[in-house]
Amino acid sequence: MTPTIKSFTNTSTDPYDRHYYTINNKRFDDYEQLRAYWWQQPMTHQPVIVHDYTIKKRISYSKGFQ
């Protein structure tokens, strides 16, 4: 039996920005910057905390369709 290889396609070239990260009370909006910072720190096993951006729901004061 030959295993099948699955491939995935990229559906968007926009940057992925659903999260921001904190480590040592520093905030990073870019994952690559966080990784660079983490590798420069001494091995203290500090956890990286991943936060979701909170998006406020749009509140419409109109009465909608009439």
Image (spheres, helix red, strand yellow):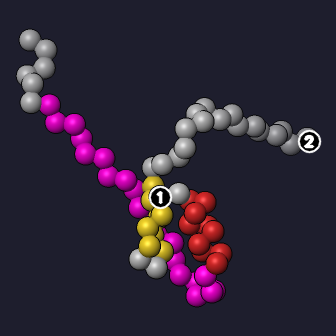
Where is residue 38, by image quadrant?
Answer: bottom right
Question: Are the residues flagged by discs 2 and 1 in contact, CB closer than 8 Å?
Answer: no
Q: Amino acid at mark 2?
A: Met
Q: Main secondary structure of the magenta part?
A: loop
Is 44 included in the stretch rendered in magenta? Answer: yes
- In magenta segment, residue 18: no
Q: Is residue 55 above or below residue 44?
A: above
Task: Return the residue nearer the eye: 17 or 33.
Answer: 33
Residue 60 pos. (x, y %): 14, 31
At which x and y percent is residue 27?
A: 43, 67
Q: Quadrant of the C terminus?
A: top left
Give the residue displayed 82% in from the left and 40% down from the top. 5
Q: Residue at x 30, y 47 (%)?
A: 55
Q: In terms of secondary structure, where does tag 1 sit?
A: loop
Tag 1: amino acid: Asp
Q: Secondary structure at mark 2?
A: loop
The residue drawn where x is 32% and y is 52% is 54
Quarter of the image that includes the N terminus: top right
Q: Which mark is residue 1?
A: 2
Q: Residues within 10 Å of mark 1 (few under 14, many from 20)?
A: some
Q: Quadrant of residue 3?
A: top right
Farthest right residue in view: 1
Compared across the picture, whether 19 is left or right of 40 comes to left
Residue 35 quadrant: bottom right
Q: Which residues are magenta?
A: 41-60
Residue 29 is labelled as 1
Q: Nearer the viewer, mark 2 or mark 1?
A: 1
The Cα atoms of the two marked residues, 2 and 1, are separated by 45 Å
Judged from this view, the residue extending furthest toward the top is 66
Q: Position of residue 56 (x, y in %)?
A: 25, 45
